[in-house]
Amino acid sequence: MAGKKSTPSEYDIRIGEIIAISRRRMGMSQKGLAKHLNVTFQQVQKYETGGNRIYVGTLIQIANVFEMTVGQLLDGVSQTYAHDRDITEVIKLMYKMNREQRKLIMELAQSIIAAK
């Protein structure tokens, strides 16, 4: 039926919560995020409450605004480090390395921590 409003799924609600948390951590208002996405702040409100589903393209835009990958955005665990630019940069660099290079970096990091 046209005009019938559907109930947001638990996934829509969770994604909205993660977006709201990420936005607040960056000190950004809904209006500020809306400006980056070229939508109204009401649309951002609907995204954050799960009231409107988010297209994949919009999700990519949101992740870019927050300087993270879509995977980090969707992974609630990632939220603890997602806004630390140094950590994000290290993660991006490690994705470009082969297994042996990553192993060397891990060993180096472990020895630096042990030396504290």
Image (cartoon, rainbow, N blue to C red):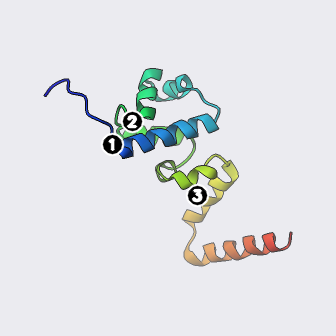
Q: Are marks 1 and 2 in contact (CB under 8 Å)?
A: yes
N-terminal of the two: label 1 or label 2?
1
At label 1, the amino acid type is Ser
Residue for badge 1: 9
SS under mark 2: loop
> Which badge, 3 or 1, is on the more N-terminal residue?
1
Residue 3 location (% of width, % of height): 20, 23
Q: Can residue 40 be seen in the rendering of this structure?
A: no
Tell me which corner region of the image, top left, top right, bottom left or bottom right, holds residue 57: top left
Q: Amino acid at mark 3?
A: Lys
- Classify residue 110 as left or right of residue 82: right
- Where residue 40 appears, as percent x and y from the top left, is 44, 21
State the image quarter where residue 32 is shown.
Answer: top right
Q: Secondary structure at mark 3?
A: helix
From the viewer's perspective, is residue 80 above or below residue 113? above
Say which residue appears at 20% left-offset and 27% top-offset.
4
Q: Which residue lies at the image location 55% right of the left edge and 47% below the top edge?
A: 68
Callouts 3 and 1 close, C-beta under 8 Å: no
**What is the quadrant of the N terminus in the image?**
top left
Q: Please provide percent x and percent y for residue 28.
A: 61, 30
Residue beneath disc 3? 92
- The quarter of the rendered structure image containing the C terminus is bottom right
